[in-house]
Image (tube, rainbow, N blue to C red):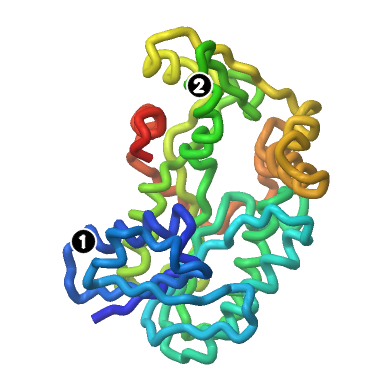
Amino acid sequence: MPTITIIPASCKTSLATIRALLSLSDPSVKIHGIYRDLSKVPEDLLSHHQFTALQGDIDDPSLELPPSDLLFHTTPNTYTDADVFEHAKRQTENLKTAILKSSTIKKIVLMSTMGAQYSSGTGELKANHAAETTISTLPASIQKVFVRCCWFMENWASELPNLLSDEPFFYSTISPADFPFPHIAVRDIGKTCAQELLSTAPPKSNPYIFELQGQSYSSNDVKKIFEELLGKEVDMRVIPPEGLLDYYRQMFSEHVAREYTEMNQSFLEGGILFLNPEPTPGGEIRRGETELREVLAGLLEGRV
């Protein structure tokens, strides 16, 4: 009877992993979701007999984990002025200490990102580099799986207020407008991570690292899909690389804006992720099944 801990459980990818695990209809699977704030637990999970919500904080050095065989972790975003790498390293060190204290964890699946192999030049993504390097130092007896995901399809949700206005428009930070960039749906991330948690196949390596991508879409492709779904013309406002910092300054502090600008520029033409001088070992790429149109339709209809 596998017991799985999800920490933190409030992130979208964590919830997708929980729902994917519960959809397997295997009553032997027991899941512990760790939340900083228990008011964030979805109502349907509170009443699910295979799920238990527990209070815990990954920022707490005295963090304790329930007895578990398997663990899923994702590095939560930080919108503070803390150093991205050091903040994520402290959180992951707390988790590492808790794993070692528990002495029951046999496998950890980390939802990471493309570019996590780079220690600089990737802005906010440096948090995933910190998580991977820290988790890699766990004993060899613990199997480690790093799922490096690409751009989330659900990131376009931030444009909903603009798209639902009288004169619909949206901003895109993917330039030029015809530049195709891989997208992945959160549900595909959840499904893949659930499969990796429950897999009993011998590991190809430890850590075992692969990339998870769906189809590639350009800003022009996104505009076309939005127009088809809304049944009207949609204005697209592409932010050029030199305008990214001013764009992010409208939403974040100066420090966070600079981190997001560097992250954004890293995957555009000429950026470190675009050039990719140190590709993922083995070069394995798995493919998500969900298409962008399905996700965008769900966003517009309030289903995602």
Check the image and report above or below for 56 versus 188. Answer: below
Q: Position of residue 165 (x, y in %)?
A: 51, 18
Q: Nearer the viewer, mark 2 or mark 1?
A: 2
Residue occupied by mark 2? 163
Q: Residue at x 21, y 61 (%)?
A: 24
Left or right: 180 as drawn, with respect to 127: left
Residue farthest toward the top in the current orientation of the protein: 233
- Element type at mark 1: loop
Position in image of residue 159 (x %, y %): 54, 29
Quadrant position of residue 2: bottom left
Q: Amino acid at mark 2?
A: Leu
> Which image quadrant for residue 158?
top right
Q: Foreground residue, 262 or 94?
A: 94
The residue drawn where x is 50% and y is 73% is 206
Tell me where residue 80 appears, x and y as whole percent.
Answer: 73, 56
Q: CA distance from mark 2 to mark 1?
A: 36 Å
The amino acid on which the numbered mark 1 sits, given as a three-letter code, is Leu
> What residue sits 52% from the left and 54% below the top?
148
Please report whichever mark, 2 or 1, sits nearer to the chain's N-terminal start. Answer: 1
Q: Quadrant of the N terminus?
A: bottom left
**Taking 129 as reference, is 179 above or below it?**
above
Disc assigned to residue 34: none
* In-front residue for pair 30/70: 30
Give left or right: position of 289 versus 240. Answer: left
Secondary structure under the numbered disc 2 in the rendered image: helix
Local crowd at mark 2 within 10 Å, few (<14), some, or many (≥20)?
Answer: many
Q: Residue at x 58, y 62 (%)?
A: 75
Q: How far across and how far down the image is residue 295, in percent?
A: 38, 34
Residue 241 placement, left or right of 287: right
Reading the image, the residue beneath label 1 is 24
